[in-house]
Image: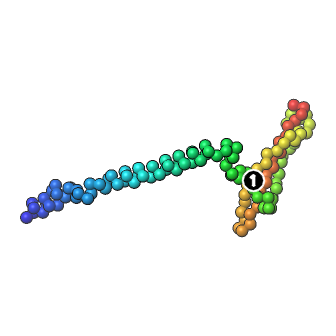
């Protein structure tokens, strides 16, 4: 009786697959292939759409233009000294870097504008 129980539990019968389980591993492959085919079709449509459209029409993205109606908070970061380190006089402003970033204060939106002037010495 004990031998029969062991054969039932650990024998070759427990390792056999039912006929409906033979297709389970292939279903994942079929699903993945379907997803890849759909993605390929979308890419082809996008490529065809771009080749038919005018090349002058770029994407209509908003790059760096924050809305003008938002309040601006400007601050300028000046160097500690604008005197030339070699001692030949004051440096001259030649330009500035301006960065803008969106800031949120609870339910208020505003644009922070930071200016970093650039200086150089005309005598050096």
Q: Residue at x 71, y 63 (%)?
A: 104
How many tags in the picture? Answer: 1
Q: Is residue 122 above or below residue 28?
A: above
Q: Nearer the viewer, residue 55 or 65?
A: 55
Residue located farthest toward the right when viewing the structure as drawn: 89
Please give the name of the residue rendered at 83% of the width and 48% of the height, measured from the top-left corner: 78
Query: In x, y percent, where is residue 6?
Result: 13, 60
Front residue of 97 and 2:
97
Other residues around mark 1 within 10 Å, as few (<14) / some (14–19) / many (≥20): few
- In the image, residue 100 sits, relative to residue 104, either above or below, namely above
- Report the residue at 79% width, 52% height from top: 114
Judge by depth and name the residue closer to the eye, 4 or 62.
62
Q: Is residue 3 visible?
A: yes
Q: Residue at x 61, y 43 (%)?
A: 51
Tell me the SS state at disc 1.
Answer: loop
Residue, far top: 124
Where residue 12 appears, as percent x and y from the top left, is 16, 55
* The C terminus: image quadrant: top right
Q: Position of residue 83 (x, y in %)?
A: 88, 40
Q: Quadrant of residue 73?
A: bottom right
Residue 99 as seen in the image, left or right of residue 51: right
Residue 79 makes an appearance in the image:
no
Q: Residue furthest front?
A: 52
Residue assigned mark 1: 65
Residue sticking out furthest to the bottom: 107
Residue 93 locus on image (x, y percent): 87, 41
Q: Quadrant of the N terminus?
A: bottom left
Residue 1 lies left or right of residue 75; in this view the side is left
Quadrant in the rendering for residue 85: top right
């Amino acid at each position: 009786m004990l031998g029969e129980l062991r054969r039932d539990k650990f024998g070759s019968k427990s390792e056999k697959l039912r006929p409906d389980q033979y297709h389970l591993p292939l279903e994942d492959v079929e699903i993945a292939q379907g997803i890849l085919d759909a993605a390929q079709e979308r890419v082809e449509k996008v490529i065809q759409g771009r080749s038919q459209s005018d090349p002058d029409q770029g994407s209509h993205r908003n790059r760096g233009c924050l809305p003008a109606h938002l309040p601006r908070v400007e601050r300028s970061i000046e160097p500690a000294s604008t005197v030339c380190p070699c001692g030949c006089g004051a440096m001259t402003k030649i330009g500035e870097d301006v960065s803008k970033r969106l800031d949120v204060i609870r339910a208020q939106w505003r644009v922070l504008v930071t200016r970093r002037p650039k200086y150089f010495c005309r005598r050096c």
